[in-house]
Image: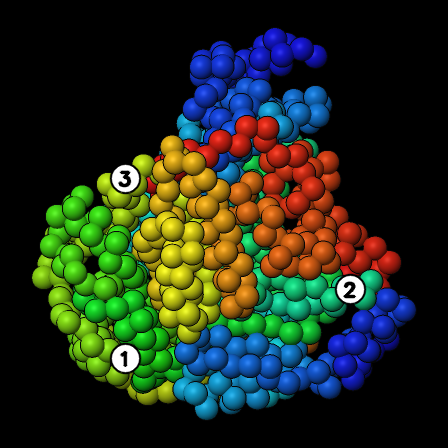
Amino acid sequence: MTLAPNSIEQLREQLPKAKAVEAMDLSAIGELIEHVPEDMTATVQAGMTLGDFQSQLALQNQWLPVDPPCPGALSIGAQLAGNATGPRRFGCGTIRDWLIGITVVLPDGRLIRNGGKVVKNVAGFDLCKLFVGSRGTLGIIVEATFKLLPKPEAEVFLKKECASLDDAEALLEQLWQSDLQPHVLDLHRLDGRPVNLVAGFSGARADVEAQTTVASALGLRTETNLDYDAAFRPTAHVTESVAPADTINFLHSITDCDFVARAGNGVVYARHQHPEKFKGGIGDDLVFDPPAVQTRIKNIFDPEGILPTL
Amino acid sequence: MGQTNLIRELQAIVGAEAVLSAEEELLVYECDAYTLEKNLPTAVVLPRTTEEVVAVVKLCNRLKLPIIPRGAGTSLSGAVLAVDGGVMIALTRMNRVLNVDARNRRALVEAGCVNAWITRDAAPHGLFFAPDPSSQSACTIGGNVATNSGGPHTLKNGVTTNHVLGYEMVLPDGTVEWLGTEPDGGEEVEGYDLRGAAIGCEGMFGVVTRVLVRLMKTPPAFKTFLGIFESVDDASQAVSDIIRAGIVPGALEMMDQLITQAVEEAYHFGFPLDAGAVLIVELDGLRDGVEAQGKQVEKICHQNNAREVRVAKDDTERAAIWKCRKRAFGAIGRLSPNYVTQDGVVPRSKLPEIMRFIRATSKKHGLRIPNVFHAGDGNIHPLILYDERKTGEVQRALAAGHDILEKCIALGGSVTGEHGIGAEKIDFMPKQFSADDLDAMKMLRRAFDPAQRCNPHKMFPGGKRCAEFAPRKQAHA
């Protein structure tokens, strides 16, 4: 069943009585609670979309440094539940790094808070981390507090077309060894076209300009944007995560796939060029055997099995 | 089983020289750097391998004995106090840097590895480990994971949880789990973020034995400023203005007049003795940006009535500034025979208010309270000075700390930014959190430690307290 509560209180009443909740519509619980620019923190209800939240923050020239595809259609709750990421994760990390407080409705209807509103806080265990990426299996996040960053003074994305994966690897190594500090480091091969390396630089204008000059000497001269990520990701068949240094090796193993790869993170999104031949799995797909702790957590937080399993 | 049999079994696992059980040997382990409460563990073991840890944990499991994991014992909150005896597992002999993987910007280290050794070994590769608690030359990475340690340079780069990719933990039932990213594995890990959930568990979920840390590229440029201000209010306003201008310095630290005088007397850096506050602003990054933002920082300091803004002229001078800052607690001995350090957090914008409150609290209790703190994070460290030989001073010092922490909660903050709850701050947990909030934390603990034998009687009210509760001088942070 799908729950669509019109208030947190209603969710607290509905959830304990619900059976086999499959989806949650929190669009009625979507207010910006507060944004304190001088503290660089903001508290928002989970039903607001990430896009709307970013627009509100932008009024004060700040942002939440995550950039998953389609922020206009992604609620804060869904963003947290899935730990959605985008190209800037290389420089900015994931939402786990920016979440400092949560309010959660537990399956038994209790409303609990964890963390707080300050950027540094070690009082109590870190349930924020537990809930990020838990896909709504332990409780429903209804409110979240984030630390924020100032919007960068300047940001630029440069790309270079590479003749082969080996060429891309050589360029990647040069970038890795240089003084450059890209916040985006992607490789992509789209519609069977050649591999492109994309590097992004952001921050103080003087830094971005200086880095652009250095990157240009390495052949990164064509200005571009990150639109490829949102266009490609929803069509990808598989996500693979390897140690960053193993990225190119992995890409060599998927010759008949298009891909977008976070080369700095070792995360690859791949799409088979002939989907009809796709047998569901490329690379070393291992069956995930959850540790006993994980099963115990689920059983303790949701003993009645009201919420889905992971 | 009697005590003798326990010792014999422990000796069979780790060897006779790695078991301490005589009272004079155990005294070192009766407390950490929080010295107001003390108790002896039943025994201390010093294992050398994960396998030995597992065998010790399984033995404790069979005998239903408490397990207390311990690093270097630099905790300021009594996190490793053996409240009810039990077997203390000290990881200090498992202290190797196993591997620096420069290409993946990772290092694999044993839990007892000293924090500063990681950067020492990573530096030749142009890399460093970001979390830098003031005790970094002594504290261990296992302890950092257990307490989610911070440090002066966490404003820009974050705290331990942002820099630990994964780790091996021996659970209280003796099973070994690798939580998070594996040494050769990818960042994305299936399932719940058990890695993140157990960082900051204060040793209550299991024994950390090996840690995979993330390394960062050493910034090519640093610029370290000393802003000399007439008042703490002016310096606090400068902090807010710097952040508001969109500048995120690597560190933003403040020292008030009392602490500046003590530091100057101890280390002779050349701090002015009559300044109301000294602000340390360190920018790091690429040369051009650091220069451009440096000009802004200087301007903001002057706009807030800075008497003088000095720039560290080279690495030696920069190192000297940080030495003074990180050893500030050590200079307090010149001011007072005893002190107690607090560790509250307020939203950055409330800094002027909490500093005014601390001044009022100082007057109210008739005790001097110097301040040296992470201004950029709103993380305050008031040092409440007292003399245990004077009647009533101990109680007044504790009352003053109490007042300050209650005010932090009232201002929307927290009673600890980096030192942890441990034994010290248990009574504040119900003030900062509801009963249901605390219950949710206990639910997580039960999943890791159903029998609640790992570092028991910490964090939550209702547990046992130490019989001996003797205020004494605290060691440096």
**Secondary structure of residue under mark 3:** helix
Q: Is residue B256 above or below residue B397?
A: below
Numbered disc in front, either 2 or 1: 2
Label 2 and label 1: CA atoms lie apart by: 45 Å
Residue type (three-letter) at the residue carrying disc 2 = Arg
Which residue is the site of mark 3?
A: B333
Q: Which residue is mark 1?
A: A204
Let me know if residue B268 appears in the view.
yes
Question: Could you tell me which chain the residue with mark 2 belongs to?
Answer: A
The residue lying at 36 percent from left, 38 percent from top is: B387
Residue A158, percent across and down? 33, 82
At 75% from the left and 77% from the top, the residue drawn is A8
Q: Are marks 2 and 1 in contact (CB under 8 Å)?
A: no
**Horizontal relation, residue A184 to residue A133: left or right:** left
User: Do circles 3 and 2 both sit on a common chain?
Assistant: no
Helix, strand or loop at mark 2: loop
Amino acid identity at mark 3:
Gly
Point out the frontmost of discs 3 and 2. 3
Q: Residue at x 46, y 61 (%)?
A: B345
Q: Quadrant of the N terminus of chain B?
A: top right
Task: Give B323 or B265, whichever is nearer the viewer.
Answer: B265
Q: CA distance from mark 1 to mark 3?
A: 43 Å
